[in-house]
Every structure is written in structure tokens, then in C-alpha cells.
Amino acid sequence: MCPTGNCTWDPVASLAVRALCSNVTSSIEKTCERLDDSSGITYDNCTVSLPNGVSAYYAGGYSTEEIALQVRPSSQPVVYTNATLPVIQRIEAVVASGEEGWNIAPDIHSNTGYVATECSLEPIVRSVKASVNSSVYRETVLTEWTKVEVWHDELKSSDRYSLLPNWNESLGVHPGQNFTLFPKSHATIRLFMESLFSGDAYTSTTRLVFRSIGTQYGSYATADVMEAFMYGNVTGCAGTENDRFGCAMRNVADAMSKSFRDQAYINNGPEADMAVGYTQVNVTIIHVRWQWLTLPLLVWLLSAVTWLGTEWKTRRVKLQKWSDNPLPLLFLYRGGEYSQTDEAQGVSGQAYERRAKSIHMRLYTKEDRAAFVE
């Protein structure tokens, strides 16, 4: 939860899965035998396979049929011989993933090249730092721990897989914390993966069929997975020139990692220990340059001088402070008898008003002049 749209959280370490994939095309073995069909026409029946692993075949003649793709787990991998989880092998005709259509079988027969990939899904511990900037969620992988320790349980005749990273709280690991894949969990994952990734796509002259092969332990989507490997719109795996199988397996690893991390919160609900985080808010920072204050200070100084001068002048003529009556100003420069009158009558507003009313003026005009005479 990030109420401001700008938040960071402390690093979190969790059990995760990574996909390791290698191109094993160089290990493909090819064997062929010549057969006669029902009409007496001779054709080649060829098998391409990895040593003790996945295989495919293609045949000619009028009843042309080829295996365009086969995916299966292998107990004798070529590269990942010390894998914790099942190793998945894939063998695919080079022309199979180009375009969908009924002409795939003849294309495979005319271009019998095959490619092979071997992938291993390995449990790891991953330290991740999450953040939200401008309402966009990001995750930064700080580091990964890949060393798996195997503990054999003599009583249950099964192996327990543990990962014990030597990290501290700066990477999200607290004292005494460890990450373990228990035998039941390992067995469940193994059976599910062996069922889900056991299928193929075979072609006849007019169609392409995706199907599951081998023993299925309740798998519900094997045929769909085989089709996705060839033609599915898998995120980040759109280019057919790339290894779509390896890319898809990396997506599978990411999905498993998210399931591991989310499951604790799903099981415990509101009682789960949530990650500690920090929220960021926008603040306004004002930089004041001293040269910018020159004009305001000068105006303030002139105002202060004017105010002090007015105060001094007011005290000198004994005017009331802060008076808004303009009459005292009329008598400000009238000396003589008026100064004595000020002392006699006072300098109140009423006194000035009485004095102003007692003055009578007459306007005299002479030729082109005019003057007031008291």
C-alpha cells in the first residue's frame, strides 16, 4: 500500500526459482531406416533425439507424418546433471514455428533440421528491493543465493533441500532464517512439471495436432502449453528467431517465484508480517539569494527613515500620534501667536477644530490679483 505514489520498502528475501537453459542442438543424434509403404514405395523413417532423452521423428511417402515439437522431462540430462527440479528438454523442427498451416508436414520433410534446448528450473533465494515512483511499481534484484544443500531424511527416505544465505538484514534475511523445500513440496512440484511439460505436436498432410504424452497426474493444460511454445503470444517471446522455449521457461520461473512469495500472505491473511517501507512526499524547497534582498531591504530602510522622521516631527510640534486629522498640519508652520495658543488651548483634535472655526477670512481682489485676508 502506497498512499502517496512514491514509496520504498526494505529489501525482502524469499524463495524463488530461476530458469537455466542451454542450446543442446549439437547433441542431437539422427538415425534413419528405409521402409516400404502399402503401395511398395520406399521412404525414409528417421528419428532425431538427445541421448536417453527427448526424441522426434519424420517420415516420407504418401502417408507423410512428422513430429514438429516434443517436450519431455529427462532423467539423464545433457548439461544440468545436478538439478534439483526436473530437467525439461525440447526438440523442435526448424521450420515448425514459422507459420501455421497445413503445409508444415511437407516443409519439415524438405528441411529436416531440428534444434534442441535443455532447461532446468532451480530453487534460489532472491533479495529484492521494491519501490513505487510516480505510481509506477519497480523491483530491483539486489543479489541471489544459488547454493542448495541436500539433507537426506533416513526415516522418510526422502531429501530436503535447504538454502542458507549468509546475508544480514540489509538484504532482507533475519537471524536464524532459512529457506527450505520440503519433500512433499518437492514431490508435488516435480509431478506437476513432469505432467505439464510432457507433450508434442505432430503433423499430417492437412493438420497440426497438439497432445499430451506419457502419464498425466491431473494436468489440465499440456496441449495448450505445447501450442503456446510454438505459436502462443508469450510475454517477451514474440520473435520466432529467438528461443521461445527458453523465454517461456523463464516466464514459468518468474510465475513460480511470485507464487512462493505471495503464498505466505495468502495463507496468513492480515496476520502475515508485512514488509517495512517508507513513503515519500513532495516538499517545496526555497533557496534565498542575498542579492535578491537588496531592493526589499532598501525599500524597508527608506520606509523606516520616513517613519522615524515623521515620529520626530510629531513629537517636536506636540501632535497626537497616529492622528488622522489634517488640521494640525495647517497650523504646523504658523508660528508666533499660534504657538502660544497651542500651549493655552492644547493640541487635541477638538482644540484645533475650535481654532479653525474662529478664523475668518475675506477675499480681496484688486485688478488682476486676489488674496485672502484674515
Image (tube, helix red, strand yellow):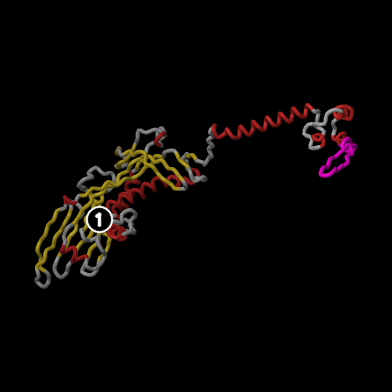
Residue under circle 1? Answer: 241
What's the residue type where badge 1 is placed? Answer: Glu
Q: Position of residue 348 (x, y in %)?
A: 85, 32
Secondary structure beneath disc 1? loop
In this view, the residue in front, 114 or 268, is 114
Residue at 22% from the left image edge and 65% from the top image edge: 104
Count of all numbered marks drawn on residues in the image = 1
227 falls in the magenta region: no
Q: Position of residue 257 (x, y in %)?
A: 36, 46
Q: Is residue 70 above or below residue 183?
A: below
Q: Quadrant of residue 97?
A: bottom left
* Rendering coords of residue 297 (x, y %): 61, 32
Q: Is residue 32 above or below residue 304?
A: below
* Nearest to the observer: residue 235 or residue 333: 333
Q: Is residue 362 magenta?
A: yes
Nearer to the camera, 42 or 353: 353
Position of residue 275 relative to residue 98, above or below, is above
Residue displayed at 51% across by 45% down:
4
In the image: residue 33, left or right of residue 77: left
Q: Quadrant of the C terminus?
A: top right
Res 1 seen here: no
Residue 323 visible, this orientation: yes
Left or right of 291? Residue 51 is left
Q: Which residues are magenta?
A: 353-374
Q: Position of residue 33 (x, y in %)?
A: 10, 61
Q: Residue at 21% x, 47% y: name it.
A: 77
**Which of the 4 quarters of the picture holds residue 326?**
top right
Mark 1 surroundings within 10 Å by alpha-carbon count, few (fewer than 14), some (14 through 19), many (20 or more)? few
